[in-house]
Image: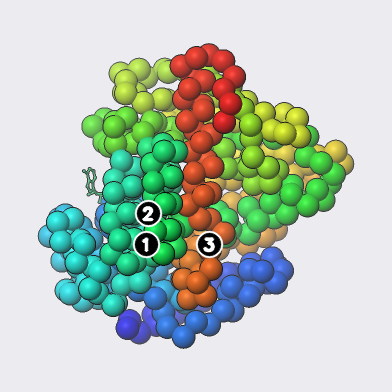
Amino acid sequence: MKPIVKISRRNFIRTGSIAAGALMLGPALSQLALAKPGKRLGVALVGLGSYAGGQLAPALQHTKNCYLAGIVTGTPAKAATWAKKYNIASKNIYNYQNFDEIANNPDIDIVYVVLPVSMHKEYTIRAAQAGKHVICEKPMALNAAECRDMIAACKKANRLLSIGYRLHFEPHTREVMRLGQKQVFGKVTEIDTANGFTYNGDPNAWRLKKAMAGGGGLMDMGIYAIQGSRYTLGQEPIAVKARQEKTRPQLFKDVDETVFWELKFPGGQKVTGKSSYNHDWSYLRARAEKGTFELQPAYGYDGLDGKINGKPMQIPNIIQQAAQMDDFATCVTLKKQSRVPGEEGLKDMKVVDAIYRSLDSGKWENI
Ligand code: NAD
């Protein structure tokens, strides 16, 4: 087992702000933060790309209930660099061919799938069949049908499945959930939300290939905005109408660039959203009967900020991924469903599927 990392001043401040954030959130999250399972669980990251390397591995240096125990990579040079940097035992390093042998490795409790979207289903199912609990990155899969297969396979293998929805552990986001779902200012009547960034990366990247990414800005960024509406209202949308815009059709020839949608909820609220690979957007604005609240930025890793009735929220940021992974480790230890199970990923993908149908039909589509 890996020794607990030495806490630097900066880490201490970060950890302190996690505790402060947890305490502000009332008993549920503070209990999680204080939960002390007997053993720190081993996590193996599958796919050592930018999110695994830039966010998850660093966050795993701050987790209390789990630690970075293993890696799965197709690139031997990456394996060597990571092994050295994170002190990973060679018996805990796998490639995509021998991955299934992870079944015989008691050091690995949780497999975290951080691959291109088209590979999520296969590696989630293989991990569950190898007896490991699974966190799969968002978007959960190429479509809702794949999500259902993944949920069924994990259930059959009696393993827990969670989606990498880090914001469900983030204090500003949890405050928005509280304000909206508990109707603190009366019923929410309107939501407008957007998430996007200006893509200037590799024109041949998997993100721009429909077969690997499932779609463009909607799959990658829009999923947060869809979910933002769902968690602010605490309801599921029943229909959607969408349209799209392309200003760089050469780059986005295979996937969507900017998508606009309107969601119909059972409560009749006015809910609009948009996603983009061509605009830097990150906000959620909600109007209720007796007040307003908003987040901007709403969906990033850090620096989230918000206002309630025009006044700053003054809530600390935390290391979202550390809170997310610690919570899942606690769930595994306590054998209880994560607050972001596969079913949560499926709900978003049903909306995404309906948005793509609406882009084709030009009509309202049922979800
Ligand atoms: P990336 O391209 O940087 O990394 C993908 C990894 O998969 C690379 O290590 C690559 O070598 C590996 N890979 C294995 N087989 C591959 C193949 N056939 N083609 C391409 N790559 C292959 O991507 P990323 O940004 O790290 O995204 C990975 C996943 O994480 C995606 O599902 C993405 O949506 C998700 N993600 C989530 C967040 C979040 O905030 N939760 C942020 C970024 C990315």
Q: CA distance from mark 3 to mark 2?
A: 17 Å
Give the mark nearest the N terminus, 3 or 1: 1
**Badge 1 amino acid:** Ala
Q: Secondary structure at mark 3?
A: loop
**Residue at the spot 49% in from the left edge and 47% down from the top edge:** 345
Question: In the rendered image, is residue 50 in sight?
Answer: no
Label 1, label 2: how far apart the Cα atoms are: 6 Å
Pick whichever of labels 3 and 2 is earlier in the sequence.
2
Relative side of 243 to 104, left or right: right
CB under 8 Å between discs 1 and 2:
yes
**Residue at mark 3:** 338
Q: Please identify, in this view, whether the residue under mark 3 or under mark 1 is nearer the observer.
A: 1
Which residue occupies 12% across, 60% down? 76
- The x, y position of residue 352, in whole percent, is 49, 33
Q: Residues within 10 Å of mark 3 (few under 14, many from 20)?
A: many
Locate residue 279, reporting x and y percent.
Answer: 48, 30
Amino acid type assigned to the residue bearing label 3 in the image: Ser
